[in-house]
Image (cartoon, grey):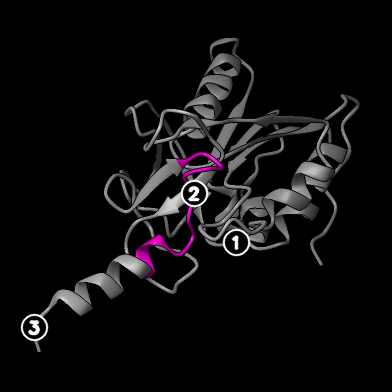
Amino acid sequence: MVAPMQRRADQGWVEVIAGPMFSGKSEELIRRVTRYHLARVPTQTFKPALDVRYAVSEVVSHSRHSTSATPVGSSEELLKSVDDRTVVIGVDEGQFFDDGLVEVAAILAGAGKNIIVAGLDLDYLGRPFEPIPSLMLRAEYVTKALAVCHRCGGPGLFTQRVVQSDELVVLGAAGAYEARCRRCFDPHEAEQQQLDVEVATPA
């Protein structure tokens, strides 16, 4: 159980930017945090320590926009790393945090801070990817971002894994995942491709 923070006079709130990969979630997070930073509002941005795809201490979008960020290993570590003077807190790749992120966001908002979390709301099988769905239910503001389907150009709601793996978390970007619409999404596509390769390979 994490300790509550000192309450501020200001009203805090929680924002969630959710959607599949390639929908611009990180870019929108960077845009919002930068907007506050330019207005001289004290900000901090955090990312999961396991995400080192583009940089260790930056949030970097697929279009290479970036902002400095502190890598943390858990929601509790995130809470302990927030400065008292900070007003706006950005959190990227929220799906990689533990379920305690929901409580931490509530504590921060109750302390008068504005927390903006970006993350996947569905995993590669199309299932709810916690803690983002639970966080969406307890947020004042929710932005549902859509990508463009890599197959047909339709509204990309799902993240399609195109490499074979049974692991829930496989870090990657182009080449490992695609955005897919409802019609083109097939959670078992990578398994079928692997099977086809095995069948086609001579013994």
The spot of residue 84 in percent (x, y) is 71, 38
Which mark sits nearer the N-terminus, 1 or 3?
A: 1
Which mark sits nearer the N-terminus, 1 or 2?
A: 1
Which residue: 37% across, 36% down?
150
Residue at which label 2 appears: 185
Q: Is residue 187 magenta?
A: yes
Range drawn in magenta: 180-191
Which mark sits nearer the N-terminus, 2 or 3?
A: 2
Q: Residue furthest bottom?
A: 203
Q: CA distance from mark 2 to mark 3?
A: 30 Å
Q: Foreground mark, 1 or 3?
A: 3
Q: Can residue 164 be seen from the camera position used here? A: no
Which residue: 63% across, 48% down?
121
Main secondary structure found in the magenta portion: loop
User: Taking 15 as reference, is 55 left or right?
Assistant: left
User: Taking 137 as reference, is 69 left or right?
Assistant: left
Q: Can residue 116 be seen from the camera position used here? A: yes
Q: Within 10 Å of the Cα at label 2, are there few (<14), some (14-19), or many (20+) other Cα atoms?
A: many
The spot of residue 5 in percent (x, y) is 82, 47
Q: Secondary structure at mark 3?
A: loop
Q: Nearer the viewer, residue 196 or 8?
A: 196
Residue at which label 1 appears: 74
Which residue: 44% across, 74% down?
166
Residue at which label 3 appears: 202
Q: Nearer the viewer, residue 134 or 125?
A: 125
Q: Secondary structure at mark 2?
A: loop
